[in-house]
Image (cartoon, helix red, strand yellow):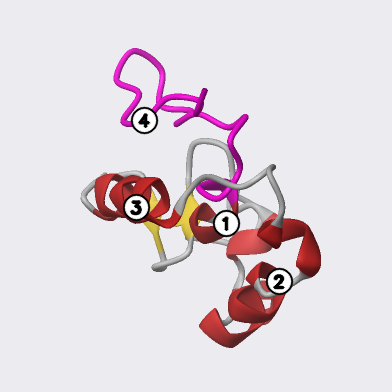
Amino acid sequence: MSSKSQCKGCRDEYRVTDEQIDRILAAPMFQTDISVPNDVYERRLAECSGCPKFQYGTTCSICGCFVRIAAKYKDRACPKPGDSRWAKYA
């Protein structure tokens, strides 16, 4: 696939490592009430890992988010149209 047909974040020079995502998730903002409980977070990640739209072990190809980060937010839902794998957390 040529780089013109890929999103910028999908190109090799823009790949984000697990260590970088770990640092983001360690930020104080993710230790507040904006985040889902750990059991909900783990279920969300499990759902995403089985999705064909999950790419590179990090990214949702539907919305372009880093799944490990998006899954932490209470106000986020799976973006897959017509087949959402998880809902916003109440």
- The number of discs equals 4
Callout 2–callout 4 Cβ contact below 8 Å: no
| Quadrant in the picture for residue 56 | bottom left
- Disc 3 residue type (three-letter): Asp
Per the rendered image, the range of residues in magenta is 70-90
Circle nearer the N terminus (1, 2): 2
Residue 84 versus residue 14 in the image, above or below? above
Residue 66 - label: 1
Question: Can you give x and y, in whole percent of width and height, for residue 26 in the image?
Answer: 68, 75
- Disc 1 residue type (three-letter): Phe
Density class for disc 4 (Cα within 10 Å; few <14, some 14-19, many ≥20) is some
Front of the two marks 3 and 2: 3
Viewer-nearest residue: 5 or 86: 86
Residue 39 - label: 3
Find disc 2 in the rendering and name its residue.
24
Find disc 4 in the rendering and name its residue.
86
Density class for disc 3 (Cα within 10 Å; few <14, some 14-19, many ≥20) is few
Kindly identify the residue that appears in the image at 59 percent across and 78 percent down: 22
